Amino acid sequence: MPSVELNPAAYRAVFSSRGFYNILLGNVLGATVWHGFFGGPIAYRILGRKPFSTLQEAIFPKLFLLQTGSAVVLASLYGRGSTALTKVEWTRFYRSSDRNVWALAIMAGSGLANWLVLGPWTTKVMKIRHRRERIEDKEYNDPKASPEMKQLNRRFAVLHSVASLLNLAFISAAATHAAYLAAFPPA
């Protein structure tokens, strides 16, 4: 059996702060893209609307927590300043011309807004809409649905759309941040 020698450069690439940073960024970006574009649509087709809603109700808070927590950890590593990452004065980050700071702020803000505000609001409206379907004994898209159901549908559509846009903002910011780090690696 050939002997395997651990390459110090490979070890540093994985276990350094830069390696951890890149792995965390890749994981949160990959998880968000996977759930939004692959896992979610597949689950909707396979499960149907109501079981899918139950699944999303369980998954989304954890996904948004992952997004928010990862963005905060990435920002703290980025702002810590070292040979791997840039020194950032976070008390005045809003004045920064550093694109990475803005990308990290967008990631944290969109994840936090979805986790604490839009996610719970959307889930609440979804549950009210399911209850209204049982009361009326009609599906949400039935043309003869009550005006209350139609208003719930509009409210759900708006909340879901805003949450989806925030999720796309997270993906765009994370991908931009990753591309910028790849194009201009820290010294």
Image (tube, rainbow, N blue to C red):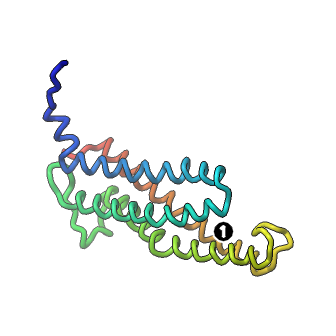
Q: In which quarter of the image is the N terminus?
A: top left
Dot 1 alpha-carbon crowd within 10 angstroms: few under 14, some 14 to 19, many 20 or more: some
Q: SS class of the residue under badge 1?
A: helix
Q: How many labels does the image show?
A: 1
The x and y percentages for residue 139 are 77, 68
Residue at point 71%, 72% (across, down): 153
Front residue of 172/60: it is 60
Residue at point 67%, 56% (across, down): 48
Residue at point 26%, 71% (across, down): 92
Tell me if residue 47 comes above or below residue 155 in the rendering.
above
Front residue of 100/61: it is 61
Residue at point 28%, 61% (across, down): 73
Tell me if residue 49 comes above or below residue 144 in the rendering.
above
User: Residue 159 appears in which quarter of the rendering?
Assistant: bottom right
Q: Which residue lies furthest to the front in this view?
A: 1
Q: Quadrant of the C terminus?
A: top left
Q: Which residue lies furthest to the top in this view?
A: 1
The x and y percentages for residue 110 are 44, 66
Q: Which residue lies furthest to the bottom in this view?
A: 148
What residue would you read off at disc 1? 157
Front residue of 127/186: it is 127
Say which amino acid is labelled 1: Ala
Tell me if residue 21 comes above or below residue 67 in the rendering.
above
The x and y percentages for residue 10 are 20, 35
The x and y percentages for residue 134 are 74, 75
User: Residue 173 appears in which quarter of the rendering?
Assistant: bottom left
